[in-house]
Image (cartoon, grey):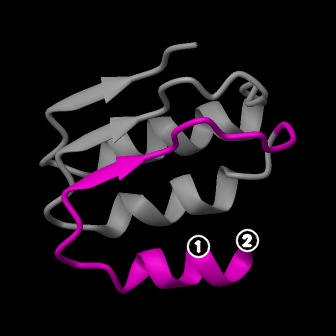
Amino acid sequence: MKEIADGLVRAKKLENFRILNCQCNTGCLTQCVSNIAFIPNLKAIDTYESTAYAFSDADIESYLKVLKISGSIEYIRFSK
């Protein structure tokens, strides 16, 4: 997961970040979410149908970081 998170920092043209049908353990995406805060064109974050993904305190802090840093977010969906 660290390699993916590191790659997201360099994805400057990424506009949509989707976590679909995720079967991850709680908190494993925290680093990825933290790194998407530095993507200047990011417009949407979607966690649709990620039933195994439960938000930890670290995950929530990561999403708050994204909202504080990124000025381009238009849409966030947290759904089951």
Q: Residues within 10 Å of mark 2 (few under 14, many from 20)?
A: few
State the residue at coordinates (72%, 77%): 2
As helix, strand or loop, the secondary structure at mark 2 comes to loop
**Which residue position is annotated with label 1?**
5
Spatial separation of the CA atoms under disc 2 and disc 1:
6 Å
The quadrant of the image that shows the N terminus is: bottom right
State the residue at coordinates (24%, 51%): 70
Q: Could you tell me the amino acid type at mark 1?
A: Ala
Q: Is residue 65 magenta?
A: no
State the residue at coordinates (48%, 26%): 48
Q: Residue furthest front?
A: 21
Picture coordinates of residue 21 (x, y %)?
61, 35
Residue 1's tag is 2
Left or right: where 15 falls relative to 21: left
As helix, strand or loop, the secondary structure at mark 1 comes to helix
Q: Find the magenta span and give its range.
A: 1-26
Residue 26 image-quadrant placement: top right
State the residue at coordinates (49%, 32%): 47
Q: Residue furthest right?
A: 25
